[in-house]
Image (spheres, coloured by chain):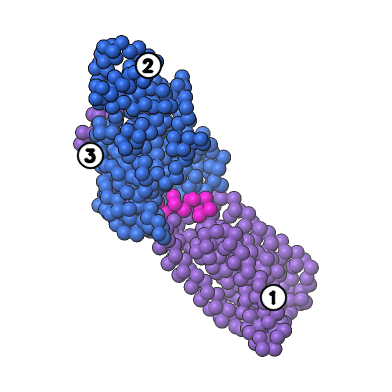
Chain colours: A purple, B blue
Amino acid sequence: MTGPTSPARPTHNTTTEGTTSTADTTSTASTSTQPKGYSSPLETPRPHLGHAVASEWTKLISVRSTVWTLGSLVLLVVGIGVLAVSETRSTDYQEVPLTAPALFGLLVGQIPVMVLGVLTISSEYGTGMIRTTLTAAPDRARVLTAKYLVFAGVAFAAIAGSVAVVGLSSAILRGGAGAGAHGGGEWAHALAGCVYVTLLGVLALAIGAMLRHSAGAIAVMLGLVMLPPVVGGMLSMWETLAPLGTVILRYNAPVAIMGLFGLPNADTGDSPGSAVQLLLILLVTGAAVAGSYAVVGRRDV
Amino acid sequence: MIELEGLTKRFGAKTAVDHLSFQVRPGVVTGFLGPNGAGKSTTMRMMLDLDNPTSGTVRIDGKHYRDLPEPLKHIGALLDAKAMNGGRSAYNNLLCLAQSNRIPERRVAEVLDLVGLTPVAKKKSKGFSLGMGQRLGIASALLGDPEILMFDEPVNGLDPEGILWIRNLMKGLAAEGRTIFVSSHLMSEMALTADHLIVIGQGKLLADMSMADFIHENSRSYVRLRSPQQERLKDVLHEAGIDAISVPATGALEIDGVAAERLGELAAQHQIVLHELSPQRASLEEAFMRMTADSVEYHAHAPGAPGLPAGPGAADNPVRPADVPAWGAGYEATRKGGE
């Protein structure tokens, strides 16, 4: 196509343009220009959600923070996991699933996942990119949906991939006769655990969309994950508040992840079922996601 | 074509934009002028559907912005050159925008070439200078080859070469039949680029006219007289029924609406020595300041001379072109003369 701007068009008074005169000599001829539209030779068919997803994919893979957060997640899960496998014997797996060594890294690794979730949107607000993004794509729900899809996909792939590496290495190295019987069920449990951590990241994205500030949103997410064991423990000291403390100790992220991985919980005895924990995080995340659509759709940017 | 109808934006008790109605026509550069804080950027954000108007509507080619399927094809905007992710390369910053509008990837290289950023396409944009950032912003505006282009203070902080480049670019784009809407707080800059003017102050429309009309209506012409016998000259002028305004800053007299010939003859008749007899045209900057004087939000006052913006002797600065009076001198004079 021809370039849309050729500076060499015949302009009037080109020679005086660089001068600092207050130019009482400006255009008198062009005011009578007939209104005529410009028609671009560029053909662009109507974009849909897929193009928004492609755009968000480019955004995610083209910044350093993605490499750092996902890199530290993989390093934590695989590094700690493989180290743990090397320190165990086959007989250690009689009571616990083969995927259990991945759990240690994942309990720390949930933090970079949440950080990436927050940064996926808060970095746009921080840099002002959000104005450019929404000018290009005024359908804010579509932009947000694309962000959720791309982030959730990438985060789940990284989490599940790292967990699989650890699980497979323990299965290969320690899965002999001494480890007892291990069915496919524990792999399904581990997968549910990966979904849980991914949902925590999605929740972080929703919080980031609502708060717009990286530090604030990350603080909220850290509090949400770190505080319940502490608060629950404290409340258990008072007799009247003890039941509440027990509930908090049963329903929080670290306990849920351990439960989903199929580890018996020593602290609370009878732990709630996996389905209950998954339902809970789905409800909380769903509410936050719904809130983010409502807020981002309405708010001035 | 952009149409605004009764556009209003309130932030709490403060009305930032107050029932603005105007049209931006294709094929010309429309200047959007107002002092700092007049509501220019808020108006532009509402045009792009970034801010929700309290009331009123904006239509782009007859449609609401949100109903444009691929907005970059209709309207390209440079609001803030820094509105990019600095950690991303110039190329990727543009690529993600192109993808969201289904614009072919080759177009990214084209616009980068157009603004001269091809050599730094793979560099992170946070290392860019102000001028390079501005070029990147313009590249993003041109990405969809749109019919309407909107620039918010595009020459702010640029060097003369950059200013000239943007000026020529805008004129070139308008000549292709595009709608160009450009905001500024500098009348002198607008005088060089705009064909049509929209002036706002405190969110209200002050003027919507062609540049030529604005010049015709607002440039005040007067004659400047300087004489060692100034008191006598004043008396003579007074006897002849001519009002003279003395400008303390320059030590000269300014006379409105009387031909220089007549004043020269008058002085000769009374044998008054003249050191200067020069017809002057007030700059557009002055006209703009007069127009927006009541709506400027934050006034500065020179120390020791309340309300007098120019220091004494400013007009004698040899660097200043002869036909440009001291900043604010003419405004001050008309204010004194008119009241």
Q: Do labels 2 and 3 share a chain?
A: no
Q: Mark 1 points at which residue?
A: A230
Secondary structure that dominates the magenta span:
helix
Residue A234 vs residue B173: left or right? right
Label 1 is placed on what type of residue?
A: Val
Instruction: Check if residue B242 falls in the magenta segment.
Output: no
Q: Is mark 1 on a helix, strand or loop?
A: helix
Task: Tell whether A91 sits left or right of B36.
Answer: right
Q: Between marks 2 and 1, how big is the CA–CA gap?
A: 91 Å
In this orientation, which residue lies closer to the viewer: A240 or B61?
A240
* Residue A153 appears in view: no
Quadrant for residue B329, please give it: top left
Q: Mark 2 lies on which chain?
A: B
- Residue B229: mark: 2
Look at mark 3 in the image and give the residue it sits on.
A36
Q: Which of marks 3 and 1 is nearer the N terminus?
A: 3
- Residue at x-position 63% and y-position 80%: A248
Q: Quadrant of the C terminus of chain B?
A: top left
Q: Give the range drawn in magenta.
A: A124-135
Where does the image place residue A219, in percent across and percent down from the top left?
Answer: 61, 64
